Amino acid sequence: MTAITPEASKYLNLVSYDRKKVKGIKDEITFAGIARVCIKLPNIPEIKCDVLICSLVKNIDLLIGMDIIKLGDFSISNGGEKTLFTFAIPPFIDKTNLYEKAIEINISLT
């Protein structure tokens, strides 16, 4: 589930409408507030979703969860010492299988 820090939630004036039990690191169970937000990513329609209001890793204010990622195709590529993050909604009909692509490349190199 997508999550936002309490500090970012306060900055955005989000109002928690419910609470949810969350299992975190070392199986710690806490309760996090839930708020409704609209998230806008480049070239993607606005996504309305619920977010957990909870502490995240240092210097991270928003964590995009599988509730959003499952709506489209998500990819992280590393090449030429640069990282490329892409996300597209709706998902493409043709799926990219990086495993099979890597096997083909590795075979051609031998």
Image: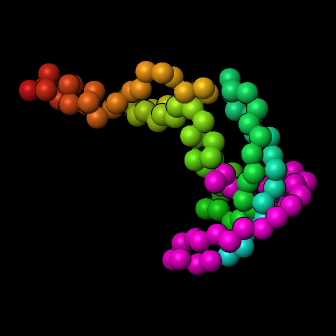
Q: Is residue 51 left or right of residue 109?
A: right
Task: Tell which residue pokes out farthest to the front in this image.
Answer: 93
In the rendered image, residue 41 lying in the magenta stretch gets the answer no
Q: Which residues are magenta?
A: 1-29
Residue 23's spot in the image, x, y percent? 59, 71
Instruction: Tell me: residue 38, above or below residue 91.
Output: below
Residue 29's spot in the image, x, y percent? 62, 77
Is residue 24 visible in the rendered image? The answer is yes
Q: Is residue 65 left or right of residue 95?
A: right
Residue 28's spot in the image, x, y percent? 58, 78
Instruction: Tell me: residue 40, above or below residue 53.
Output: above
Q: Is residue 99 left or right of residue 76?
A: left
Quadrant, the N terminus: bottom right
Colouring used for the render: rainbow
Quadrant, the C terminus: top left
In the rendered image, residue 21 lying in the magenta stretch gets the answer yes
- Where residue 91 sits, quadrant-wise, is top right
- Where residue 61 sits, quadrant-wise, is bottom right
Q: Residue at x 43, y 21 (%)?
A: 94
Residue 79's spot in the image, x, y percent? 38, 30
Q: Residue at x 63, y 42 (%)?
A: 68
The tally of labels here is: 0
Toward the viewer: 60 or 104? Answer: 104
Instruction: Tell me: residue 81, above or below residue 22.
Output: above
Is residue 83 visible in the rendered image? The answer is no
